[in-house]
Image (cartoon, rainbow, N blue to C red):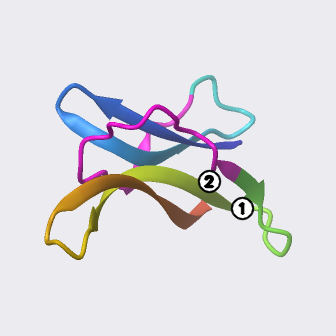
């Protein structure tokens, strides 16, 4: 099983993560970082884009699409916060 998700802490911006476990395991593996967040999120909506699926050609690989916080440069030179998506192939297993 593979689970993709967004996460943050008081000292880390919203980032994209994943975790996994084999069916024979009792607990999930330590979360892996897909893409770190790089700016404070000030919006009021999050989590519209998240998906994780098994690769149809490989029983050990998964694909995940997750959101993370990223800056957007404006023509004025200012920067505003926005979300971005990270796409990653995760190969679970020993």
Nearer to the camera, 74 or 52: 74
- Dominant SS in magenta: loop
Q: Which mark is residue 90?
A: none
State the CA–CA distance, disc 1 to disc 2: 7 Å
Q: Quadrant of the N terminus?
A: top right
Magenta region includes residue 30: yes
Going by the image, does 90 lie left or right of 76?
A: right
Going by the image, does 3 lie left or right of 13?
A: right
Q: Which mark is residue 93?
A: 2
| Residue behind mark 1 | 60
Start-end of magenta stretch: 28-51
Q: Count the marks.
A: 2
Going by the image, does 13 lie left or right of 3?
A: left
Rendering quarter of residue 77: bottom left
Magenta region includes residue 85: no
Residue 26: horizontal and vertical position, in percent? 63, 23
Determine whether label 1 and label 2 are within 8 Å by CB: yes
Nearer to the camera, 52 or 48: 48
Residue 34: horizontal and vertical position, in percent? 43, 57
Q: Quadrant of the C terminus?
A: bottom right
User: Which residue is pictured at 46% across the width and 31% down the height?
Assistant: 44
Q: Is residue 84 above or below residue 58?
A: above
Query: Dot 1: few (<14), some (14–19), or many (≥20) neighbours within 10 Å?
Result: some
């Amino acid at each position: 099983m593979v689970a993709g998700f967004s996460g943050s802490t008081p000292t880390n911006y919203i980032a994209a993560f994943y975790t996994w476990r084999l069916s024979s395991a009792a607990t999930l593996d330590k979360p892996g970082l897909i893409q770190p967040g790089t700016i404070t999120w000030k919006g009021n909506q999050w989590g519209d884009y998240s998906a994780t699926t098994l690769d149809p050609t490989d029983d050990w690989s998964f694909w995940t699409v997750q959101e993370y916080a990223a800056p957007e440069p404006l023509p004025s030179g200012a920067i505003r916060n926005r979300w971005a998506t990270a796409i990653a192939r995760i190969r679970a297993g020993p």
